Image: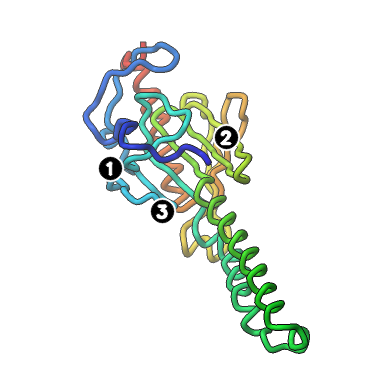
Amino acid sequence: MPDIFTSPAKTPASPHKTPTTKLTHIGKVKKSRSVDEYSAVMRKERPTRSHWRSYMPKPERTSFDTQTSDEQIILLLRPHPITLLKQVVIITVAVVLPLLSGSSFFTSFLPGSYILGLNLGWYLLTFSYALATFLIWFYSVFIITDERVIDVDFVSLLFKDVSSAKIDVIQDISSKTGGFLASVLDYGTVYIQTAGEQREIQFENIPHPARVAALLNELLLEEEREKAEGRVQ
């Protein structure tokens, strides 16, 4: 599984702590500021301790496997839980179906042990589907740090697709919310155009897309400010 959550021995720097001077992975000395100093979006958010949310600003005790020692996670996102509605309906129907068909014509002639075996097999398949659905949702994350944006698509236990782009190569940011339900629950997609190898990164069906786009714009401005003030040498 993806290494998203840290052990106590590997706790990354929190994005709301005091400013530090750090050496980036490309050898540049950079004096970083607390995200609350330059981000109006994050200034209103409290650090997140729970790992089960789909919108996690300034998450604590959280890291990912390619994170550098001084890289700070500012926001971690998952698809909005409402996007699992179809799967939840399927699982619910699958759980209830054997109870409704227990005395049906198609199973009434079978011995009780056969019916029990069929029900156990059915519920095992249902549990496997429910577990796979949860894992795909839980580990498919979108991460915004003070250095990069990362899109982790967790396809299965054996395969994941990770794409990333540095903040300073982002060229355009837009957000889209479509449909009545998405407007009411405030979820949608953020499109990130870059000048890097990965031309476009999409954060799909995430909560508060306009807020996320505003945060990315603030990070872009901070990158420009760092260069103008000589905090990146």
Is disc 2 placed on a helix, strand or loop? strand
Amino acid under disc 3: Arg
Q: Position of residue 16 (x, y in %)?
A: 26, 36
Is disc 1 placed on a helix, strand or loop? helix
How far apart in space, not on screen, are marks 1 and 3 (Cα)?
Answer: 19 Å
**Residue at figure coordinates x 27%, y 37% from the top left:** 36
How far apart in space, not on screen, are marks 2 and 3 (Cα)?
Answer: 21 Å
Amino acid under disc 1: Arg
Please tell me how crowded label 3 is: few (under 14), some (14-19), or many (20+) other residues with Cα within 10 Å: some
Q: Camera-side residue: 54 or 45?
A: 54
Between disc 1 and disc 3, the foreground one is 3
Mark sitting earlier along the chain (2/3): 3
**Residue at figure coordinates x 51%, y 39% from the top left:** 2
Amino acid under disc 2: Val
Between disc 1 and disc 2, the foreground one is 2
Mark sitting earlier along the chain (1/2): 1
**Label 1 belongs to which residue?**
43
* Image quadrant assignment for residue 193: top right
Asked if disc 1 and disc 2 are in contact, CB closer than 8 Å, the reply is no
In the displayed structure, 102 sits above or below 178; it is: below
**Label 2 belongs to which residue?**
162
Location of the C terminus by quadrant is top left
**Label 3 belongs to which residue?**
53
Q: Position of residue 70 (x, y in %)?
A: 35, 24
**Residue at figure coordinates x 40%, y 41% from the top left:** 75
Please tell me how crowded label 2 is: few (under 14), some (14-19), or many (20+) other residues with Cα within 10 Å: few
* Image quadrant assignment for residue 126: bottom right
